Amino acid sequence: MTTLLIALAVGGGVYLLFLFLVAWIAIHPPRSPIFLSPSALGAPTEEIEFESDGLKLRGWWVPHPDPRGVFVLAHGYVMNRSENAALAARFYDSGFSSLLFDSRGCGKSEGTNVGFGWLERIDVLNALRFAAAKAPNLPKILLGSSMGAAACAFALAEEPSLADGLVLDSSYHDLPSATSGWWNFLGGKTASVVLFPVMFIGWLLTGINPYRVNVGDALKKIDKKILILHGKRDVMIPPFHAVKNHEVCSNSRLIWSESAGHAEMRWIETERYIKEVMDYVREIVIGK
């Protein structure tokens, strides 16, 4: 019996240590390198930086000579501003300036940990203020991918006057479900069960209560038309997240991509993606 108790105690300790290490890595993910820029695709690009929560965030400003508006683009988890470089180039061709930036703990920006969209909302708010200073009196459109989409929703719910439109690309609805989806994506249902307690360790390490991080609650506070884009083959953030976000937001429009996985519509249905976004912008911003 004593041997069994010791074995259980050792096994439990190893399991807890493993969960702690996984949580630590999730909060401090490796930084992906800058792999693409708008300038590489023919759009003028300026290096910029601005402060957010005491951190220096770095990014790109893509200035159009006669802009119709400004896109503020937020990237996803374990990504950086390069994720949105191709979009910025296409928006430039359509007459829009863009601000792309690395959120805290990502790319070339300062910071040692990520906040899964909740802390990044502060970065989005400061990015909007930077864009307003660069291009005053122009419409601002927020577009975020995955974690960046959630950050955009939280930011706009906090200060709705800072942007005129919101595009959510593959956003989660609530953080606990998103966490399970991430583990399921990496290792299947077994991993999602084994690693589920990582969320609670992350809560202890960051002070962020995952059960209060809910995009749907944020959308209820936004009195603007919202565009939701989602892939029906998304395993990481399954389609029910988009359905829930759409259901709680009566002024939203939900666009499905039948063949896209997580945040893939922009890559595999590019022309349709751009058309849907620009149609939305014309309705919400240009047509005002």
Image: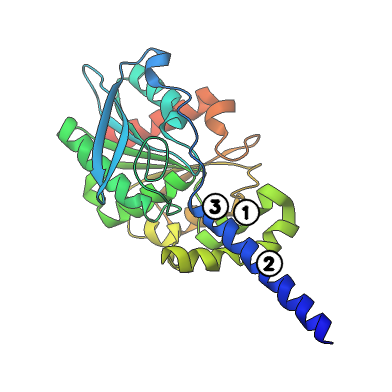
Quarter-wise, where is residue 82 in the image?
top left
Q: Amino acid at mark 1?
A: Gly
- Label 2 vs label 1: CA separation? 21 Å
Give the residue drawn at x 62%, y 50%. 238
**According to the image, label 1 marks what residue?**
181
Give the residue drawn at x 51%, y 46%. 29
The quarter of the image holding the C terminus is: top left
> Which mark identifies residue 285?
none
Quarter-wise, where is residue 248 in the image?
bottom left
In depth, the one of 84 and 205 nearer the eye is 205
Q: Amino acid at mark 3?
A: Ile
Query: What kind of element bears circle 1?
Result: helix
**According to the image, label 3 marks what residue?**
25
Image spot of residue 19 (x, y percent): 62, 63
Give the residue drawn at x 54%, y 53%. 26
Q: Residues within 10 Å of mark 1 (few under 14, many from 20)?
A: many
**According to the image, label 2 marks what residue?**
15
Image position of 262 (left or right of 5): left
Q: How is colour applied across the structure in the image?
A: rainbow
Outermost residue on the bottom side: it is 1
Q: Residues within 10 Å of mark 3 (few under 14, many from 20)?
A: few
**Camera-nearest label, 3 or 1:** 3
The quarter of the image holding the N terminus is: bottom right
Q: Taking the image as drawn, is residue 167 in sight?
A: yes
Q: Taking the image as drawn, is residue 163 in sight?
A: no
Q: Amino acid at mark 2?
A: Tyr
Image spot of residue 187 (x, y percent): 71, 50
Image spot of residue 212 (x, y percent): 43, 67
